[in-house]
Image (cartoon, helix red, strand yellow):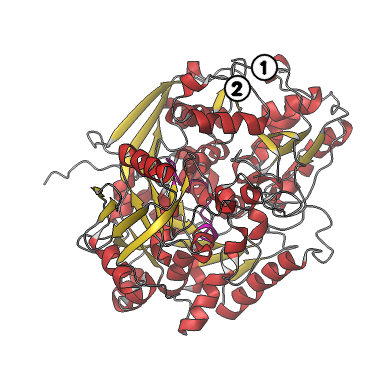
Amino acid sequence: MSKTPATLFDKVWDSHVVKKIEDGPDVFFIDRHFIHEVTSPVAFLGLESRGLKVIFPEKTFATADHNTPTINQHLPVQDPLSANQLKALESNSAKYGISHWGLGNPKNGIVHVVGPENGITLPGMTIVCGDSHTSTHGAFGAIAFGIGTSEVEMVLSSQCIMQPKPKKMRINVHGQLGKGITPKDVVLYIISKLTAAGATGYFVEFAGQVFEQMSMEGRMTVCNMSIEMGARGGMIAPDETTFAYIKGREKAPQGAAWDKALAYWKTLKTDAGATFDVEHNYDAADIEPMITYGTNPGMGMGITKHIPTAKEVGGSKASYDKSLDYMGFHEDDVMIGKKVDYVFIGSCTNGRIEDFRAFASIIKGRKKAEHVTAWIVPGSHIVEQQIKDEGILDILTAAGFQLRQPGCSACLAMNDDKIPAGKYAVSTSNRNFEGRQGPGARTMLASPLVAAAAAVTGVVTDPRELI
Amino acid sequence: MAYDKFTILKSSAVPMPIENVDTDQIIPARFLKATERKGFGDNLFRDWRFNGDDTPKQDFVLNNAIYSGKILVGGRNFGSGSSREHAAWAIYDYGFRCVVSSFFADIFKNNSLNIGILPVQVSPEFLDKIFKAIEADPKAELEVSLPAQTITILATGEKESFDINGYKKHNMQNGFDDIDYLQSLKTEIQAFAANSPY
């Protein structure tokens, strides 16, 4: 009997459908559920008002990250509203028997950093969290995506959500990346081509030589930003790089269970002849260090280029003008040399050890530009420890930088890490929306290398000149 | 959380012809710190609606008394960005029951349907017609019929159909949510979980 060729996405999706509803969504089973302090409290209130229990508490993991402070974490949280949310996460987790890595716990960190680094995220899983960057976990060949609070309540109470199956898109990037071109540049390049809504309605598989050669940290950066092209999520077929990353991590299978899991994981790839609704092909040689100039992640450009004109961008001229007015930029401006006030390295996009190694490779032997305020925020305590163990902290200190404590920080500015109104930030995070990093803040998204180059020169700089 | 049943909505509409309205604009992150679902409407479009000193920005559409109604009409790619359901809560709490656009971000669309806001996706041409009708008469009414799956500009009689799956349509017409439905499947879910490798 010959089997119909299937995509990686089909294999994982179809094996998680509890029930198909005619002219409706699938009842979709969730293997791992992450929760944090911001999008879970109302879901727990809902459970209580309906008198429901958490069906499988061992499949849900809580970590505090969105509004935690990144200095003085040993002291009580000053903002009473933030403190209240953190307390709610702790008490709800305790009440329902959910594992909770709160502030001060050595496993604490950004949800999409701690899941993989502790072996909770595994190939072939379905993973959700009330956070759109849950797509990060797709790097392991999992179907992972963000959900709303009503759906958090569904997962807590039934381990399922109601989801229509998205369409399928494959994005291939062929060839070799040039010097100084990072995974962040690859994904910003793809989004600039597809636009911020170009993959809406689709689940993306990233394929081709560039992703095959990429580290797990890099793959996580790419999948993390799938949502910024509108996709429900993005995934990459697991391979030896994936298996080597997972092996030995605390919650990964061990012994015979490992062998069994591995045999299954090796089947998780798109079969020859399987079809996608849409396919895009790009050449790695066309990608240069990227930076955004507008107020959505689709407004990105090669760092040596001029800001594309409204005509080149297409779409609504009024929306384009609104974006550029907000940024204080003009069409056809050169980005190189624009003044930078703040630099932020961190977030679930670029808060892993490889990102800090890249940052350190540029600042080593140089000094922070005097007028630049830099926030260096590890994605987790484990990353923080790696930064210390690998001597990166010494490089940071010598160059005039300070290391902060883990959390989402200035990526969404829920805590005190807010970029002041009108100031320019080069940020390794994922969104350059108006006010995202603080009311009036002007964000330019870029890689850790571009961030490092800006931090030492004080202006937008092509990092290839400093490598 | 229960919500109002949705059948036929006849209302004037608030126009917001901006593309890529993201959920950080709909409700900025600093207003996500509540542990209960109430009062989010006060901060709907906070930074577009108010100055830093909390005075209203006169040129923003929600501060313009000539526009009102239970329908919000937005530009292409409405609701992009964060998965925060707070964005849908804020829109609902402010008094909107329907959002019309030529294109919605997926998570926002899901969240809206889950809390009783009907997202109506129309063609770019029809969206333009709606904006023009409101420009001609700020009180121009739209009629959104969920049973018929149509949206009509009452002044001109121009009409377009929209898609919604049968399951969600039934839920919205009756004010049901998915949580109750999933509870009814508990035995099947338990059996499924027993065979899961994870």
Q: Specify the segment rendered in magenta.
A: B74-87
> Mark 2: few, some, or many residues within 10 Å (few <14, many ≥20)?
many
Q: Residue at x 44, y 25 (%)?
A: A314
Residue at which label 1 appears? A464
Q: Nearer the viewer, mark 1 or mark 2?
A: 2
Residue A337 in magenta stretch:
no
Q: Chain of mark 2?
A: A
Residue A179 in the image: x percent, y percent? Answer: 60, 18
Q: Is residue A460 left or right of residue B88?
A: right
* Residue B138 horizontal/vertical position (percent): 44, 49
Eyeballing the image, is A385 above or below B179?
above
* Residue A378 appears left or right of B190: right
Query: Which quarter of the figure is the C terminus of chain A placed in?
Result: top right
Q: Are marks 1 and 2 in contact (CB under 8 Å)?
A: yes
Residue B84 lies in the magenta stretch: yes
Which amino acid type is shown beneath numbered disc 1? Arg
Distance (Cα) linking label 1 and label 2:
8 Å
* Residue A247 in view (yes/no): no
